[in-house]
Image (cartoon, rainbow, N blue to C red):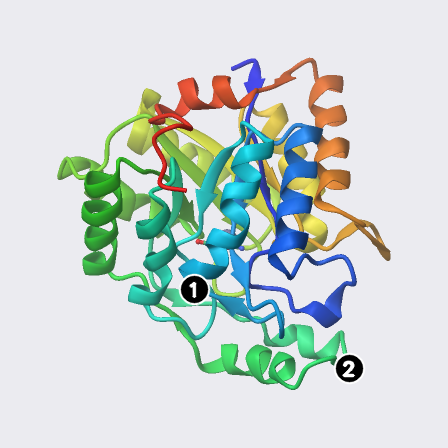
Amino acid sequence: MDKVIITCAVTGSVHTPSMSPYLPVTPEDIAEQAIGAAEAGAAVLHLHARDPESGRPSPDPEVFMQFLPRIRAATDAVINISTGGGMPMTVDDRMQAALRAEPEMASLNMGSMNFGLYPALARNSDWQYDWEPEFLESSRDFVFRNTFADIETLLARLGDGCGTRFEFECYDVGHLYNLAHFLDRGLVRPPLFIQFVLGILGGIGADPDNLMHMKRTADKLFGEDYRFSVLGVGRHQLPLVTMSATMGGNIRVGLEDNLFLDKGVFARSNAEQVTRLRRIVEDLSRSVATPAEARAMLGLKGGDAVAF
Ligand code: KMH
Ligand code: ZN
């Protein structure tokens, strides 16, 4: 209970390059910011890739392989590769980088849902690339596909096949019941690491009451068999992750989910957000888990057992 795992989600696929000059785009940017976040106290690095020319989210394992070895050489942090990818990737596209890299962790999204990014069109107008407004607009008619069959495939190929364990991303209460279904079937094994995701348009809203409800429901379904972490989107990041640290949970920060440090002030790096949260965690008389402690808490296979 004392140790807090800080996950830093470095670039993601929700934001586009014109939204912040600090969003990492190239493999060099991603490596540099990931290493900075680890040095600031992130035990887990949640990673997506982007096309180095356009900044568009990319599932290409070759692009991942341009930054993964560099991060591994410079830090001991746990590498967590996204299988959520970004629009309009197929589920098959989304799993290729993790299958190639066989990381200690990968994200696993626990249900199909709407995933509305188009409200960002009203907040920005100066686009560097044509693909950016088209990408955001396309979310109006996009289903983020994560069927039971898709989840079974990822559990078998990545979990059983590669020894990868999961960050179970739960965007609403029903996703917790989906995870409980896989636990009942013996397809997932404790300790489960559940990411409560609050504030995506299409998922549960970002407020304290909803976080308490997610936690109560997970307690009911999983008892001692799980650890939770919290991710709040945009301006909800800081209050909700602070609440998680207060409740005995873990936290996820990073430019994937929030570009700002304060209202109207960009975070100039992922490390800035990690540094702030580390201070808050320590002010709450908890301490930040090292990568080794995170590995023990989550039952991971070890940083040497990866394929990059
Ligand atoms: N940006 C999060 C809300 C994934 O990578 O699998 C969603 C996410 C999904 O992290
Ligand atoms: Zn992600």
Report which residue position mark 1 lands on: 60
> The disc labelled 1 sits on which kind of residue?
Asp
Label number found at residue 272? none
Q: Quadrant of residue 70?
A: top right
Dot 1 or dot 2, earlier in sequence? 1
Above-or-below relation of 102 to 116: above
Point 34% across, 20% down: residue: 224
Q: Along the line of sight, which residue is nearer the eye, 195 or 16?
A: 16
Viewer-closest of 306 and 215 = 306
Sort mark 2 into few (<14), some (14-19) or many (20+) by Cα contacts within 10 Å: few
Outermost left residue:
185
Is the residue indicated by label 1 positioned so its CB lies within 8 Å of ligand 1? Answer: no
Disc 1 packing (10 Å; few <14; some 14–19; many ≥20): some
Vertical arrangement, residue 173 with respect to residue 222, above or below: below
264 sits to left or right of 186? right
Depth check, mark 1 against mark 2: the one in front is 1
Q: Is residue 201 above or below residue 79?
A: below
Expressed as whole percent of the image width and height from the top left, the position of residue 72 reads: 52, 36
Secondary structure beneath disc 1?
A: loop
Residue at horizontal 74 percent and vertical 68 percent from the top: 19
Which residue lies at the image location 60% right of the left edge and 33% below the top edge? Answer: 74
Residue 275 is situated, as x and y percent measured from the top left of the image, at: 75, 32
Residue drawn 20% across the image and 54% down it: 153
* Alpha carbons under labels 1 and 2: distance apart: 29 Å
Give the amino acid type for the residue marked by disc 2 in the picture.
Ser
Which residue does the numbered mark 2 point to in the structure image?
125
The image shows residue 254 at horizontal and vertical percentages of 65, 46
Q: Is residue 80 left or right of residue 93?
A: right
x, y percentage for residue 5? 55, 27
Instruction: Quarter of the image for the C terminus: give it.
Output: top left
